[in-house]
């Protein structure tokens, strides 16, 4: 497991909701998944990448109100250096789950 995934798992685990990288296969009716949808060089110095931008989407899936969970996710990730980009409320008719997608950005310094 890479360090960024580990950071996200450790940061979100105290929320008391199951968290899975890319998918969740448990039985809970409320859970969180996340994935990195883009990784790109952001700044370059001396012919090398100085910073890598990680674009992460965190998804909350639930049959009930997830407002408090979303607030907890945003605060927890902000506390460890993530910046929120945008979010969307969705509904999945095939599963009956409400779905909140939240996109974040994390800037990782690289050794050049």
Image (spheres, rainbow, N blue to C red):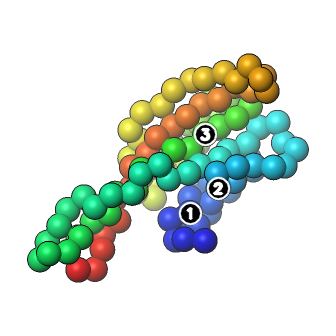
39 or 71: nearer the eye? 39
The answer to whether one can see residue 87 in this image is yes
Q: Is residue 78 left or right of residue 47?
A: right
Among the two numbered marks 1 and 3 on one chain, the one whose residue lies closer to the N terminus: 1
Label 1: few (<14), some or many (≥20) within 10 Å?
A: some
Q: Which residue, given by chain and number where applicable, does mark 1 sit on?
A: 5
Residue 89 in the image: state x and y as whole percent. 57, 23
Q: Are marks 3 and 2 in contact (CB under 8 Å)?
A: no
- Give how far across and how far down residue 87 sits, in percent: 48, 31
Circles 1 and 2: CB atoms closer than 8 Å: yes
The residue wearing badge 2 is 21
The number of numbered badges drawn on the structure is 3
- N-term mark: 1 or 2: 1
- Quick one: quadrant of the N terminus? bottom right
The secondary element bearing badge 2 is classed as strand
What residue do we see at 51% from left, 26% from top? 88
């Amino acid at each position: 497991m890479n360090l960024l995934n580990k950071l996200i798992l450790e940061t979100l685990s105290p929320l008391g909701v199951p968290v899975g990288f890319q998918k969740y296969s448990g039985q809970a009716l409320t859970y969180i998944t996340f994935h990195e949808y883009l990784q790109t060089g952001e700044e370059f110095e001396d012919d090398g990448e100085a910073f890598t931008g990680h674009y992460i989407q965190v998804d909350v899936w639930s049959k009930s109100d997830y407002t408090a969970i979303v607030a907890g996710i945003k605060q927890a990730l902000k506390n460890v250096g993530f910046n929120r980009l945008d979010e969307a409320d969705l509904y999945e008719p095939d599963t009956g789950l409400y779905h909140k997608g939240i996109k974040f950005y994390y800037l990782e310094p690289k050794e050049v």
